[in-house]
Image (cartoon, rainbow, N blue to C red):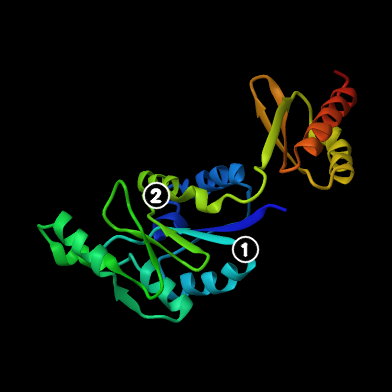
Amino acid sequence: MPATAAILTIGNELVSGDVPNTNASWLARRLAPLGVEVRLTAAVPDEIDTVAEFVRNEAARVDFLIATGGLGGTPDDLTREAIAAAFGVPQEEVPEVAAELRVRFNRDPEYAARWALLPRGSRPLANPLGGAPGFAIENVYVLPGLPSEMEAMFASIEEEFRRGSAIESWRRVFPTYESVIAAALAEAGERWPAVLVGSYPSFGSGGFTVEVVLKSSDVGALAEASAWLSSAIEERSGR
């Protein structure tokens, strides 16, 4: 069975729609080849109690909870405080991290050193492209919100998430309607329960189409299901 993950993106700008929430989709795509199935994605505002409640409720339900955002130095960057509250621990300065930050940001060293106030028991995660470090505590990983920094930090630790077989995918676009192929989609799901079946209709200049996507960590089942379903859809679509 694949490992499981929840992704939490933190920021008032995400909840309001002022900034596109790209981190969750990027992480989900990156976790699948590592054998990790994302069970939940959520966005919450920069509120200590809201973040802490989510982490307390969801971290126990998955193998990994990955949070992004709220690690800077502005008043709305409260993620360190929120994660400390979730685990019921104080924040403590990590001396070596604080010392490095003071050297790197010598124009305002104490401002930067505040980024080293991590929840007790945390393991700092280096930020290859920025200042504020991420951190991990138990099965919770906290990464920056800025996509370039988040992606670089995740790349540096991604092997920590590898579990079992990669989740492979098969996808194909058919010139048909969902109503025509719904029964075939359902039958594929029943025949191959280890395969996740999805369909995504759209309408463009060429007319109606449906993209069918199958996903599974069982390569054999995925191959059988995709071959059968492709043939069934073509037959039912009259093509």
Q: Residue at x 65, y 55 (%)?
A: 3
The residue drawn where x is 68% and y is 36% is 169
Q: Secondary structure at mark 1?
A: loop
Rendered residue at 71%/27% (across/down)? 172
Q: Residues within 10 Å of mark 2 (few under 14, many from 20)?
A: many
CB of mark 1 within 8 Å of CB of mark 2?
no
Q: Where is mark 2, residue-wise?
A: 153
Residue 36 in the image, given as x and y percentages of width and height: 62, 51
Q: Secondary structure at mark 2?
A: helix
The residue to which callout 1 is attached is 62
**Which residue shows up at 52% across the image and 70% down it?**
55
Is residue 9 left or right of 174 when viewed as pictured?
Answer: left
Q: Residue furthest left?
A: 107
User: Is residue 35 rendered to the left or right of residue 143?
Assistant: right
The x and y percentages for residue 65 are: 54, 61
Q: Give me the C-alpha separation between circle 1 and circle 2.
A: 21 Å
Q: Position of residue 127 (x, y in %)?
A: 32, 52
Q: Is residue 139 above or below residue 4?
A: below
Residue type indicated by callout 1: Val
Quarter of the image for residue 68 reads bottom left
Q: Residues within 10 Å of mark 1 (few under 14, many from 20)?
A: some
- Quarter of the picture holding the C terminus: top right
